Amino acid sequence: MERIKIKTKYFLLLFLPLFLTVGSLSAWGVETKLKVNPNQLFLSGSPFASVTGSLTLENPSPSPLTVHIYAQDIIQTLGGEVSYGLLPESDRYACARWFSFDPIEALIPPQKSVEFRYTLKIPEGTQANNYAAIIFIETKPQNSEGKGPSLSVSQRLGVPVKITVERVTAGKLNYFKLPKLADTHNISFVINISNIGTTILRPKAKIEIFKGNKKITEINWPYFEVGFKETKDFEYLWEKTPIGGFYKAKLTFWDGSGQEVLKEASFFIFPFTYSFLCLLIAIISLLVYKKYRQKTKSSKTKQK
């Protein structure tokens, strides 16, 4: 069955008919006076916190009622039909499994009420959006004399739920890399960032370069962004030509939530380029080899 997304602007239009159809306790022409408070829920939260609350069920009838509570997803088809069930966990609009209840079943005596507590725990990695679910309360009235079958059938009372997953900006700096040995051209700084929030991440970063205790420059990292659930490498090439020696790079990272992360790394810059160093090593190696050959020939001559 193909579904369409329940858009925010249509949500209230869907909510009202849902409440009218499942918000009153009736089934197959049999009606009772069980009451639920509240009769609809508007919840909001983030994957980093739990939302708790309660539903109070009142039994004003002269007979006891056994009540069972659970949540299901609201599914709307392309034809406009609405049904209920548990969507696969991989489905981006599945949210019924976010609920847990305590208790999940209770016996409500006549003229009494029972409180059911719910906990909404939004999974990590859920995208900021609006989601729809429904909490069902199934009842089966008990025979007041304890003899024979019950005179009423099982019924369902539905409490529609709108869940708003809030926009949370959060990033994780996994590492800060730079070469331990470098020449004076195009020194590469690399940061790896994961987006662990509920929306696109647009962090900021800066690098301060020190030689000893003296700050010689400050680099503001160019604009970059990390998509929802993405992990990315970002490279910055420092094209300056400092003198050789030992340096320290201090990275400051802001993920947009107000949190600041500091990382430090040290590196050494040669006072000449790699190519010149390689040439020098080659010349020295050649001179050593020639000297060794001469020494070997001299030893053979003496032996003769």
Image (spheres, rainbow, N blue to C red):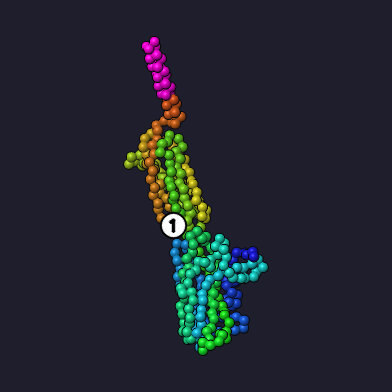
> Foreground residue, 211 or 174?
174
Residue 212 percent coordinates (x, y): 33, 40
Residue numbers of the magenta segment = 283-304
Query: What crowding class fits label 1: few (fewer than 14 Cα within 10 Å), some (14-19), or many (20 or more)?
Result: few
Question: Is 285 included in the stretch rendered in magenta?
Answer: yes
> Foreground residue, 26 or 160?
26
Residue 62 percent coordinates (x, y): 51, 88
Which residue does the image show at 56% across and 85% down from the upper left? 149
Residue 289 percent coordinates (x, y): 42, 21
> Foreground residue, 261 or 295?
295
Which residue does the image show at 50% across and 51% down from the upper left? 231
Quarter holding the N terminus? bottom right
* Residue at the disc numbered 1: 257
65 to the left or right of 80: left
The secondary structure type at the circle numbered 1 is loop
Q: Main secondary structure of the magenta part?
A: helix
236 to the left or right of 213: right
239 to the left or right of 9: left
Question: Is 134 included in the stretch rendered in magenta?
Answer: no
Q: Tell me: residue 36, above or below residue 268.
A: below
